[in-house]
Image (cartoon, rainbow, N blue to C red):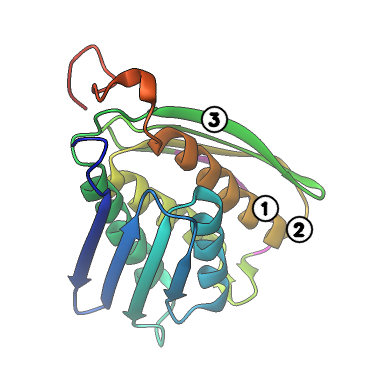
Amino acid sequence: MSKSAPRTAKISRKTAETEISVEINLDGTGAYDVNTGIGFFDHMLEQLSRHSLIDFKVRARGDLHIDAHHTAEDTGIVLGQAVSKALGDRAGITRYASMDLAMDETLTRAAVDVSGRPYLIWQVSFSKAKVGDFDTELFKEFFQAFAQHAGITLHVTNHYGENGHHIAETCFKAVARVLRVALEIDPRQNNRVPSTKGSL
C-alpha cells in the first residue's frame, strides 16, 4: 500500500446474535460516531477513537436481552477486521509502541506489535463484576477479538488502581495511544514493510 493511498475500510458482519458495521480511517482526527446499545462500551470505544486519532463509525445491534457478551466480542471482531483491511500489506508503518498511562489513582501499560501474529496478554483485574451495567470480564473478550482479527500482538497490564471506571478507561486510552504510534507511517521506512522477512 503506498503512503498516499487512503487507509480506510468498511466491514459488516451479521449473525443470528449480532449485526455489526464499522467504518474507519486510520489517518483521521479521532472523530467518532458510536452506537452499540451499551452506554459504557460506547464511552470506551469513543476513547479508543479519540486518543488513537482513528476515525470510527460503529453500529451494533445485538441480543442484549441475553447479555452484552456477543455484542462486545463481535464488535471487537469487526473493528479488528477493519483495521487489518485498512492496513493492507502494512508497508511503511512504525509497527511497535508501548506506554504507561495514568488516570488519577490508576496506572496501566499497553504494548503492541502490529506483526500479523495475533496474541493478547491481559493482566487486568477488577474488584467488582460490573462497571455500570457492563460486565468487566467482557473487556478482555473485546480486546481478544480485536487483537485476533487485527493481527496484532497486544499486551495490557494494569499496574494498580481502585476505581473500575478508571481501570477500564486507562486500558482503552493506553491501547489507543500505542495504536496511534504503531500504525503511523514512518517516513524513514520509505514504504518498506518493517520486517526482515519482507512481509507481515
Tell me the quadrant of the picture where the C terminus can be found.
top left
Magenta-highlighted residues = 121-128
Task: Tell me if residue 21 is in the magenta stretch.
Answer: no
Name, please, the residue furthest toward the front.
4
Looking at marks 1 and 3 on the same chain, the residue that comes earlier in the sequence is marked by 3
Categorize mark 1 by other alpha carbons within 10 Å: few (<14), some (14-19), many (20+): many
Between label 1 and label 3, give the one nearer the viewer: 3
Residue shown at the point (64%, 50%) measured from the top left: 170
* Whether residue 47 is situated above or below residue 118 in the rendered picture: below
Identify the secondary structure beneath mark 1.
helix
Of helix, strand and loop, which mostly describes the magenta segment? loop
Residue shown at the point (42%, 77%) measured from the top left: 36
Residue 15 placed where, x, y %? 19, 75
Q: Distance between the residues labelled 2 and 3?
A: 23 Å
Between label 2 and label 3, give the one nearer the viewer: 3
Q: What residue is pinned by disc 2? A: 163
